[in-house]
Image: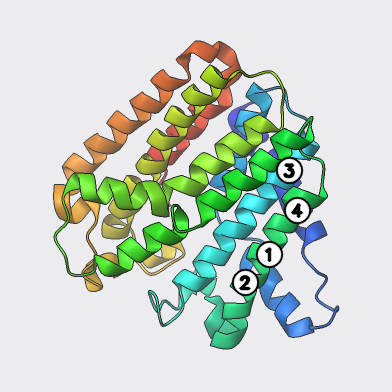
Amino acid sequence: MDFQTWVGARLSLVEATLRKVLPAPDIAPQRLHQAMRYAVLNGGKRVRPLLAFAAGELAGADAERVAFAAAAVELIHAYSLVHDDLPCMDDDVLRRGKPTCHVEYDEPTALLVGDALQSLAFQLVSEYRLAGDAETQLDMIRLLAAAAGSRGMAGGQAIDLAAVGEALTVPELEFMHIHKTGALIRAATLLGARCGNSLGEADFGQLDQYAKAVGLAFQVVDDVLDAESSTAALGKTAGKDAQHSKPTYVSVLGVARSKEFAAELRQKALDAVAGFGERAARLKQLADFIVLRKF
């Protein structure tokens, strides 16, 4: 199966899983459930689910199990975007090529959408059997919670808000984005792998190194695209980082050096999984996609 065919099949699986686990739009409270589906379905690159599937295949995991883990991560990601777009955060009006959740519905509903999506994510990783034993599944719940919390994504967002108008160094930028963007990307990769049973702790260490590298690369490329691409191409407001005086890799390093840095991170990711041979083919292809993407 070539890469694009594999991506299409995995995207179909995670989309079907999300449709299954999200409350139906006609169940009360209907407006909240409709807004939840609006925020999650039919949009986004689904990079985090794809990483979960790729790592799961490396670990010999059943794709149906991985689909629920991947859906949980995507629900956390979607909730973070809904809250990120609120007027009290980035105050954005466009996401995934359509009006943001609080614009399409209203601010109170958008706030509740984020709350409900986060709760649903943890319902999935506790309700469905994702691992071979209970101890591993409890560890997966802990891993997702840590990635979403103050020592992960939420903490990274707090650092990002505090950094507006500040001149950060590259290490400070990395610290921020290891948390804000990288934590959930790492969690997706490791959760997918833990759905299988063929990896040792040293293998998980290599996967974590891979995920750290692609997580940072994703953010570097995001910063470049925000500076160079159009709103139509991105499906979200282009140039908003500069408008909001946010420190980015482009503002610190410039576009050319940022692209070089992304390429270096891609190579680190490839080196980290080189020992897995062909089993890591999808992870390598995803590293290429993350760095070479145009949207």
- Give the labeled residue for mark 2: 115
Front residue of this view, candidates 102 and 206: 206
Note whether residue 106 is visible. Answer: no
Identify the residue at horizontal 25%, vertical 50% (top origin).
173
- Give the labeled residue for mark 3: 67
Question: In the rendering, at what x and y percent does residue 110 appear?
Answer: 58, 79
Measured in 3D between alpha carbons, the distance from the residue under mark 3 to the one under mark 2, in whole angstroms, is: 22 Å
Measured in 3D between alpha carbons, the distance from the residue under mark 1 to the one under mark 4, in whole angstroms, is: 9 Å
First of labels 3, 2 by sequence position:
3
Question: In the rendering, at what x and y percent does residue 30 appear?
Answer: 79, 82
First of labels 3, 4 by sequence position:
3
Identify the residue at horizontal 63%, vertical 74% (top origin).
113
The label number, if any, that marks residue 138 in the structure image: none
First of labels 1, 4 by sequence position:
1
The label number, if any, that marks residue 119 in the structure image: 1
Disc 3: CA contacts within 10 A as few (<14), some (14-19) or many (>=20): many
Amino acid carrying label 1: it is Ser
Note whether residue 74 is visible. Answer: yes
First of labels 1, 3 by sequence position:
3
The label number, if any, that marks residue 124 in the structure image: 4
Measured in 3D between alpha carbons, the distance from the residue under mark 3 to the one under mark 4, in whole angstroms, is: 10 Å
SS assignment at label 1: helix
Query: Is the Cβ of the residue at disc 1 closer than 8 Å to that at disc 3?
Result: no
Q: Nearer the viewer, mark 3 or mark 4?
A: 4
